[in-house]
Image (cartoon, rainbow, N blue to C red):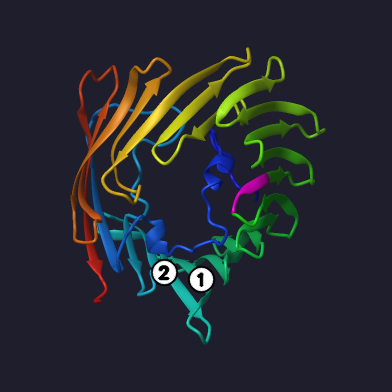
Amino acid sequence: MRPPGCSFVLSFLVLARVASSQVERKTDAQIDRFAGPVKSVASAITRSDAKWEQPGGPNLIEPIWCKDCEYDLDGNKTKSGQVVEGEFFGDNIRLIRDANGHVTDRFSYSASTGELQSHVVMGPFGMTEQKVYIEGKLRFRSSFSYDQYGHQSEWLSFDAKGKSEGRTSTATDKEGIVTRRSDYGKNGELSDEQTFDPETQVDHFTTFDEFGKVKLTWTISHGKLISFWEAPDSPSQYGEGFTISEGDTSFENYSCHADLSCDVSRIHYEYLDGNKHTPRSAEWRDSEGNLKLAAYFDYEVDSFRNWTYRQVWVWDPSLGERSLYETDFRVITYWPR
């Protein structure tokens, strides 16, 4: 199974330029945006009747990544899902460790049926194999390879019978900068490729049909779009929308069309503190600087700076004023220090 596509191309090459040469592995708790020795989290979400939605592009409202979860002392997730009307729906996770205490295998079981959902084999840089099961039967398998610095270099996907479903190949230099990413289909055909030259600061992205003919291509130089082309009379396709990072807090969003024109807008975030995980506001403006839509956040945080209460306010021209969109509560417990 190939990695799923998305509605826009987030410029991984731009983001990768700030990567370190040696990958720093995050714990499951850190990936879920928690700080400190989190033991468990229980969430309650109340949605208002305010009608608000955003177009394709970076999310203005960050979701709650794990609604009802538990973690071990090392930050590994042992339970993941959501409680609905008093019943837990999700996975119970069993961890296998080696003699040094490192997790080597993760088995996820359905909390409702007890059936095996997935089996992940862990290596020194991350998962090396993943098997996914549905109703107790293997449905697909993926394998992952890494370079000497811990950067993922290849992702292979297979169906239940071992037949290729596609692969992704990534080249990363010793400084941690991704210089090429190539996606291939189940028959080995190149479907899309993105490259970055650190010396010239040029990004280049191209998609191909099954015969190797170019469907769409664009080039970015020093963070600015300098060319865009797609085949005439093409339907809307992967690659027409993409986002360019302008640092940690601002992004330029491009939505391009068959007539080779592109609508450009800018998204800017302000954060509660330096971790860039807890936004105070997110505003989306057009090329003239006019506000198109926005989200604003009020929080209560604990001693670890994890939020325990959140109000999400939204705005767009149809609302006319800031409107309460969502109210979230979280009860977080911690392992003793």
Along the line of sight, the residue nearer the viewer: 22 or 191: 22
Dot 2 and dot 1 residues touching (CB under 8 Å): yes
Q: What stretch is highlighted in magenta?
A: 176-180
Q: Which residue is painted at 42% across and 26% down in the image?
A: 266
Image quarter hosting the C terminus? bottom left
The residue that mark 2 highlights is: 76
- Give the amino acid at mark 1: Arg
Q: Which residue is painted at 58% across and 14% down in the image?
A: 261
Any magenta on residue 170?
A: no
Badge 2 or badge 1: first in the primary sequence:
2
Q: Which residue is painted at 57% across and 71% down in the image?
A: 124
User: Which x, y percent locates residue 234?
Assistant: 67, 19
- Give the amino acid at mark 2: Asn
Q: Is residue 126 visible?
A: yes
Q: In this view, does 95 lie above or below 138?
A: below
Q: Can residue 90 be seen in this view?
A: no
Near mark 2 (Cα within 10 A), the count class, few <14, some 14-19 or many ≥20, is many
Q: How far apart are marks 2 and 1 (CA)?
A: 10 Å
Depth check, mark 2 against mark 1: the one in front is: 2
The residue that mark 1 highlights is: 106
